[in-house]
Image: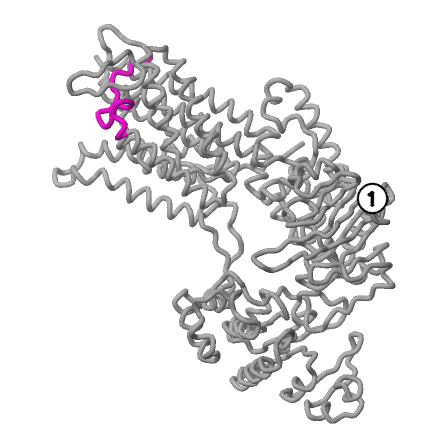
Amino acid sequence: MAIDTGILINVGFFVYVSIVFAILALGFNLQWGYSGLFNAGIAGFFLIGAYTAAFAITPRTPPSVGYPGHLGGFDLPLPVGAVLAMVASGAVAALVALPTVRLRADYLAIATLAFAEVLRIVAINLESITAGTIGIPGLSPPIVFNPPNGFLNAMVKLGVSAAILLGLFMTLHFIAESPWGRVLRAIRDDEEATMALGKNTFQYKLQVFAIGGALMGLAGWLFAVTINYVEPSGSFAPTVTFSVWVMVIVGGAGNLRGSIVGAFVIYGLEWLSVQLKDFVPNQFKDTVFYTRLMIVGILLIVLIIYRPEGILREKKRILR
Amino acid sequence: MTEMGNGQAILRVESVRKSFGGINAVDGCTLSVNPQSVTGLIGPNGAGKSTLFNLIAGLYRPDGGEIWFNNTRIDGLPPYEIVHLGLTKTWQIPHELRNMTVLENLVLGAKHNAGEHLLNLFIQPGKVRQDEKSLRVRAREVLRATQLESLANEHAKALSGGQKKLLELARAMMTEPALILLDEPVAGVNPTLAGSLMDLIDRLRRDGRTFFLIEHDMNVVMNRCDRVIVMHQGRTIAEGTPASVKANPTLIKTIFGLLRPTAGRVAFQGEDITGMHPRDLVLKGLAYVPQSNNTFPSLTVLENLEMGAITRRTSPIPMPWNRRGTLPDRSRQMTDAQIRRRAIGTLNLFPNLRPKVRERAGALSGGEQQMVALAKSMMLDPDVLLIDEPSAGLAPKLVDMVFSKIVEINGKGTAVVMVEQNAKKALAIANRGYILETGRNRFEGTGPQLLQDPNVAKLYLGG
């Protein structure tokens, strides 16, 4: 008897999109939860990663009737696309950080939010490079099955995403819980005091902004590869940034595991609200999706009041 | 260049200036500190002492002048480079890293720790482990010396005020400094602990370190310092041995808590308020108008008034680690709209300010600024108003105006205590007068009694 693979494909989709969000959340947690840098341009770095991946991975696509074409089409292997996405996004993050990372938290937020919006609007309008709102299709999945097999395809994506998340988590844990990471937490608690302890805080902030940006770029690559399609108006809107904030706040700032938990919980609510459509009376079919927004809102308020440190609170580091 | 420039001094400050929005916080300050000394820096609040420390430590950049540490010019260097040269500072209000443990706070003080460089984590893991291990051992030794060992793995935010001061000193020691600037090291520390803290400083000094400290506790200044430098209005006005420099702590500042009394009590409406924090005193109904710097020059008159009623702390973005204590009651009672209404009500008492409510306070004349300061202090409807030299620096006509306003405020039911050099005019409007000499009551009586007393007239009223 055959298992209903449709449900598994659907669950697989939930898992690998959650993983994309988890990587974004890890990057933001490193910047904000560890270092106190409130990045409001997450969607922008995510966009750079996704487009760099699309330019690098897709085969050559010349302009044709009804399609403006796009930059690249270099037909490079997937891992090369991942590296390029991280390098591009990390480099841009460092450039953005140079003038802005000295700003106070609220101004840094305004500057990065503006940066991300400018980037998205450019991506919408610069048709010759990004194909505008038509987007870039045709990113091939990690393994192409012949004949096409939706179930195996979903499972491969799931496996690749899970392996990447595991590797990233271990690497980030290693660097964030090191003496280097300790300086980041010191900057977050009191930058002036950290400078008076002999640390070049600007350099640390620059590094962590670039690393966080590179992670967001990697998330962009994974997103593009798992969805097989890049388009600027919805996928990189400021709401993506806001979702990641909520994930880190709910999961627990300053705790890397918390970012992963937060991503699965918050994206899980969205995914469930979509699934509900099949189980509610007809008159609610169009609105049930939005219950998610109410649930997330209430969850956030309750959490901020009763557990402001998040589901997994930052741990006390006991030194022996 | 001068006799103190001959390489003897470990620290030389020469004509250093720093101003903030038109106020000269440090105004041509020159001083030097000898190696292996404990040098005290004293002076009234607002004299520029903490600003000077921030300039020396590189946290502020001077507008002019030079700062030399050993034989290196350090003004304009970033703070982390100055630390690496062997100069560090502590804060008056402890800057503990609140969400980190005491031990983490200390280990961060080390100047060289391989693991603090990202690449070393991957290319020199052995050195990273070794550095970290030896630093933890050293940090524990310092904790033992500062009696904080039992708190090693507590969050710094869980420490008491006095313990945080110890933590500041301990953390500063981890940077292996030759010169340590201490901003009020024993403020808020209980006497026993303060004594052992100063003993520790003595020991460290004998090991070859130099201490330069701001302190209001006269016991510390008189008994523990080799040399004392007095600062006033951004300059040094006196220096010498503690015995030769006797500062006069003024009573009004003692009452207000800006200077802590070494003995005696201050009672307000039957309650002992000695040493209470100024913020709490304001909320109890005690307001204070300082002699100078008593308005916010870059804010408008209306904003100045509103500031008088705003005592809460807000953060633009809610960060879980920024959660501080609850709001005090008096401020909680007022919404923004209520504050605005009260400001407009207060302006009824100061009709000549009304056409200028949108002007920056700094652009007003001295007399008008004094009015703004008075109005600002009336915003919380105080029971007692302390005024320090309301006539200082004002033209005679303006003095009359300010004094008649004080009479008017008093008539509305607020008790006024003022310190005033212009004794004739002050006593003319005073119900009661006290004349102090070297910190003690010399004469006391009603205003008219004192005015008519021939001794008072001879000594203080210019015959």
Q: State the residue lying farthest toward the front.
A: B1
The quadrant where residue A39 appears = top left
> Residue flagged by tag 1: what amino acid is it?
Leu
Please provide percent x and percent y for residue B114: 66, 26
Subunit that carries the residue with mark 1: B
Q: Give the range drawn in magenta.
A: A124-142
Q: Can residue B285 be seen in this view?
A: no
Does residue B240 lie above or below B290 as drawn?
above
Looking at the image, residue A307 sits to the left or right of residue B210; the answer is left
Question: Which residue lies at the image location 16% right of the left edge and 20% below the top edge?
Answer: A66
Look at mark 1 in the image and give the residue it sits on. Answer: B204
Please provide percent x and percent y for residue A103: 50, 43
Count of numbered circles in the view:
1
Question: Which residue lies at the image location 59% right of the left edge and 45% below the top edge?
Answer: B98
Looking at the image, residue A198 sits to the left or right of residue B210; the answer is left
Closest to the observer, B156 or A11:
B156
